[in-house]
Amino acid sequence: MPEASTGSTTANPPRSLAEALRARDDVALAALLHARPDLLNPVPGDVTQLATRAGTRASVVRALDRLDRFALQTAEALAVAPDPCPYPVLESLLTGGEDEAARAALPRALGTLRDQALVWGDEERLRLVRTARELLAPSAQRPSPTGLGPTVAEATAGMSPTRIQEIVAAAGLPATHDPVSAVTALTGLFTDPERMSALLDEAPAEVHQVLERLVWGPPYGEVTPNPTPPVRWLRDRGLLLPATARTVVLPREVALHLRGGLAHRRTAPLAPEVGAHREHRPQLVDANAAGQALAALGTVEELVKSWEHAGPLVLRAGGLAVRDLKRAASTLDTTEASAAFWVELAYAAGLLASDGEADERYAPTPAFDDWCELPPAERWSVLASAWLPATRTAGLVGEQDAKGRTLSALGPDLDRSAAPEVRHRVLDLLADLPEGGSPDPDALLDRLAWERPVRGASDLRARLAHWTLTEAEVLGVTGRGALSAFGRALLRHLDPAPLLAPLLPEPVDHVLLQADLTAVAPGPLRRPLGDTLAVLADVESKGGATVYRFTPGSVRRALDAGHTAVDLHAFLAEHSRTPVPQPLAYLIDDVARRHGHLRVGAASSYVRCDDDAVLGEILADKRSAGLGLRRLAPTVLAAQAEPGALLEGLRAMGYAPAAESRTGDVLVARADAHRTPARSAPVPVPDGPPVPDATLLGAAVRAIRAGDLAATAVRREPASSGGGEVPAPGELPRTSAAETLATVQAAALTGSAVWIGYVNAEGAASQRVIAPVRVEGGFVTGYDHTADEVRTYALHRITGVAELAEDQV
């Protein structure tokens, strides 16, 4: 039998959900509002309004979606049980009299349904709220998860009395005088185990084969105009009843007999265990996770910096074009799905956004510069703290929405409000394992599916859990599938930086130059060194040690940025632990010698060179035909192409021209880094109303209790001279203006409370219990027991007033 907390038999059982809620104490009422915060918007005026709102379809659907599997199976069993349902009948539907685990778990499941206001009544008369019964009960359009069909009474509704009497006779029952008693007799036969067993013992073997296909659902089957003998035998005796012209259905009572009284083929009373599938040393997990965290910092920084000069355009509908996502994946040397995650992570952290210009582009935000100056552990904390509560779901990129449109990275339709909850729950399950323990992903997904079973066709929660495991690993929250120490701190809303910082290598201030025109960085480089080297060389490989390669193009890029050959030699000599190799010195000198030998300016554009033989070579080269060159002077060529196009054309021909200003000075070609105006990080989309805090819950409970007092307070019988009647509960009192004034004045003199009906300026009517203290100037001021505060009311808006019985306030 259930524990007392699930509801015990009382002398006066509640007759409605409102009465059941009214009988709860304040703690239980606050627990309901905490579990179903949608009931608080707005705060119900009294318990009756609360019960009405708790029974609305939207609220019930939301509550059902938050039940665990066994609590939902309990509700499904109640939906196919008699209404009201005694506790032993419910227990039999879920256990069949044999499942001890289900019997032991039933009080908890029933208590959950009571706490959620989905079930009310005592043990002898358990009732599922009407809306939940409608949602979970079987119908032809919406089969029940139990696989059961309609009852005999439901399936025979609309059937002709003659046909019902034919079924009764074929089943061996005596004829009745009306269809109602015939249906009752047939139901009695199907619910009598002994008589049903005797009836089925007479059936041919083929009949049992037909029943086996229908007994666990779906209970519907198609029939031809000339059905087979087994189907005809079942149909004649009412064991199959017509659902439509071409389908029949197995009545619920017959299915329950064949199932041994079970509502479900399998129940799941216990949550699947999530154990440690593999165990690693915690130090190894933390080291692995720290390496991933360091790689994540480099990936995000490289991505955002690649957009600081000419970021990708924003699509007209919002988001990133497919070609730009592919370009980002190529830059990061990763897959498009992974690139989408890093793009969305940087966006969630507020490091990049759209610039809002006419040709709108994505670019770094000013917050990116501040982020770059933070220590590595704090930079990681910013990223991880943005990832955990984010509702934007990068895993959806590339899929199609309901209208067949492809979802793009940074697009407007990637928010999924369930994502933060799933992430937290996955990490909570990892945190419950011993340190260094990693679970079997399938076991973890089974646990999540039990905690929130999917009632529809969507598998979004399972996919969110899978993406969480992948993202947590590449971000460094986990290492080798186990939660890291700093990941645990993040989950507990503590600062993970102090735990991560000792695990990260210190930035180095040197590189190792090699004879093959490469430089090896033995660790993360300090920022000035890393920024300069990124201009002077190209990254060839990443990892624990980054390899940079020097090429003519990379050296020219440094010269274009304003460095001289002397600067570059000094820079390398200062920051290299090995001597500068001769091939690298020759490369720098050779590119510098040719750099700026040609000068390009605006005429439309021109080329000038002190060596007229070089200009002659350019004119003779067929590749220069598209530039529209012609000689103006021995050392000057004019061009039809713009300066930028002329520079690129000459470089493609193998020359190293430099741009010059109108005064003839060499222009530094490095573009200024572009930043957006100050932007806020995207705000996660909430999954329904926010969970109320203790202060709001306390105020809401007081308001509901006070409103209930106003609605249910017993009014004193009016004097015979008044000629009025005590209004029924829920109705506003009606008194004349003179009687209203006299009653509130008398209450102010005696210090007693009165019950008033009041209509505010917006036309909303309410009932209040007030204790008047002052009546003057057309207003009454007093303590409002409903609002728990002193208020002033206009007398002309009071519809009526009634004195309360002496024991009410």
Image (spheres, rainbow, N blue to C red):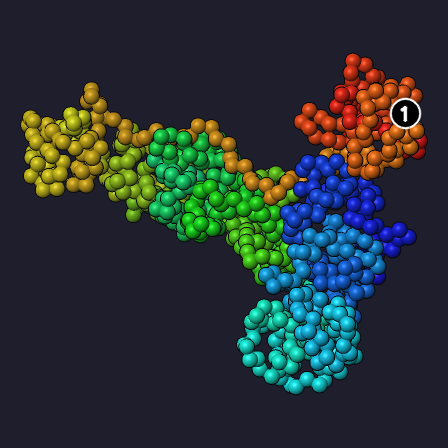
In the image, 29: left or right of 541?
right
Does the rendering let one see residue 517?
Answer: yes
Q: Amino acid at mark 1?
A: Ser
Q: Of helix, strand and loop, which one carries label 1? A: loop
Kindly identify the residue that appears in the image at 10 percent across and 27 percent down: 636
Residue at point 58%, 57% (across, down) = 456
Which image quarter: residue 32?
Answer: top right
**Can residue 440 be seen?**
no
Q: Which residue is under mark 1?
A: 752
Instruction: Give 108 or 767, whichever is nearer the viewer.
Output: 767
Q: Residue at x 66, y 86 (%)?
A: 204
- The picture places residue 526, in percent across and down from the top left corner, at 44, 36
Front position in the image: 740 or 621: 740
Q: Where is residue 803, by image quadrant?
A: top right
Q: As drawn, which residue projects farthest toward the top?
A: 777
Vertical position of residue 194 compared to residue 53: above or below: below
